[in-house]
Image: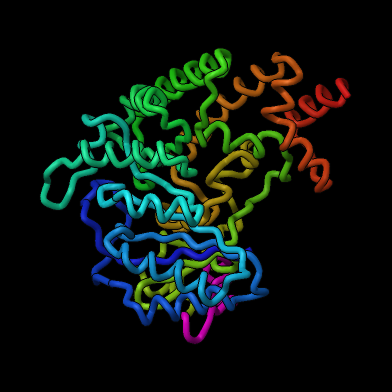
Amino acid sequence: MYNFTLYMTTDCNFKCQYCYEDYHNHYQLNEKTLVDSLEFMMNYGDRGKVLIDFLGGEPLLKKELIYQAVAYIKDNYPEREVKYYITTNCSLMDDRFIAFMKENRFTVRLSFDGNKETHDLNRVAKDEVSCYDKIFENIMKVKDSGLNFSVRMTVTENTIPYMFENICYLHEHGLDNICMIMDVYLKISDELKAEFEKQVGQILQYYLAEAAAGRVFTIDQFDGKMFNMLCNFGNCFGMCDAGIGNFKIFPNGQIYPCGFLTSNEKYCIGNIKEGVDIRKAKLIAMSNFDKTDPKCKGCTIRDFCHGMKCGYMNFINTGKINVPSDAECIFEHIFYKAMVQILEYYLQQPIEIVREKLGVYIDYIQEEDLKFSEFGEKIAKRLGDER
């Protein structure tokens, strides 16, 4: 399977304080480049399953081109398996587009930071007028439609004190698939670290209390880390397949390995006409790898750490793909402590709950002949003893 992100435009109707996309030129996808991009994607590699993620800027500024893209694939590649994603601030969402996404089984990522007070701290329209009420109304429509969606709640220095409050707010409104996105450029002080740890502790207790009451919801920093907690990867750096199986296609047809690199043409690895230079993609990664690994050598949570997976997030902060920022390091250690408590909680639960929550990970590790972590061995033994 190949993953493609298609940038519809670099423009956005918002000017979020934490946006990492800094484009000096404004690019707009046109119909010809759209078709050429789709042909490139559908004919790349082994022509197997394709994942297409519509992104911006704000992709719904080019809503009509998204309609055209899906129609083109249906007309020209009716037998191909294609999965669609979109990331949007939801300000331009409407009933027609929701129905279209439902028909074509989109997975939707909604950029939404919580309640009005928090959301308006950093996410404002370019005219500096709050559109929170309209966005919230649109998000509720997406939820009620039955679409597969998640909420991307960006956490910044000025919103760390409200993390717990906003997790509760989202959950109380039925927005039960939440991913906390840490501001990639965040600098963290001792005071901020203490506040972050306090907030995560409150979120953890709320998460466990809701689980005990049968009101289960998903927090990506917890649920999305289960596999990493149960599998032993050998404490090695395991970057994603950026530039190898995962490509970012810009509105001008240029191809990049990662969204963190799209503002610098130096890291362009090809285009939709001439193809991808895989050698250059590998060279970019290898030339920015710190072989001495002074920061993470001997770290006990390397298998768990997001910094050991997201190389170019590290790169834009430290200049090395395998050296995470100080803030990322702090965040991951705090989340790891929370995950230990979550797994200890599940070890004490009835076997049916353990199997429902963790069985799929244990089965996969066994089927793929991977190694269990210490927690993985405990869970596997518990499940095995009951069989």
Q: How many marks?
A: 0
Query: What residue appears at the point 41 percent right and 56 percent down from the top-left corner?
Result: 100
Scheme of colours in the image: rainbow
Quick check: is 283 in the magenta stretch?
yes
The x and y percentages for residue 96 are 33, 54
Q: Is residue 181 left or right of residue 375?
A: left
Quarter of the image where one finds residue 291? bottom right
Query: What residue appears at the point 50 percent right and 28 percent down from the top-left corner?
Result: 334
| Vertical placement of residue 270 versus 215, above or below | below
The residue lying toward the viewer, choosing from 386 and 310, is 386
Which quadrant: the C terminus? top right
Query: What residue appears at the point 39 percent right and 70 percent down from the top-left corner?
Result: 68
The x and y percentages for residue 196 are 39, 27
The residue lying toward the viewer, choosing from 350 and 160, is 350
Q: Is residue 200 left or right of residue 30?
A: right
Quarter of the image where one finds residue 230? top right
- Which residues lie in the magenta part? 271-286
| Vertical placement of residue 37 versus 322, above or below | below
Quick check: is 326 in the magenta stretch?
no
The x and y percentages for residue 265 are 37, 74
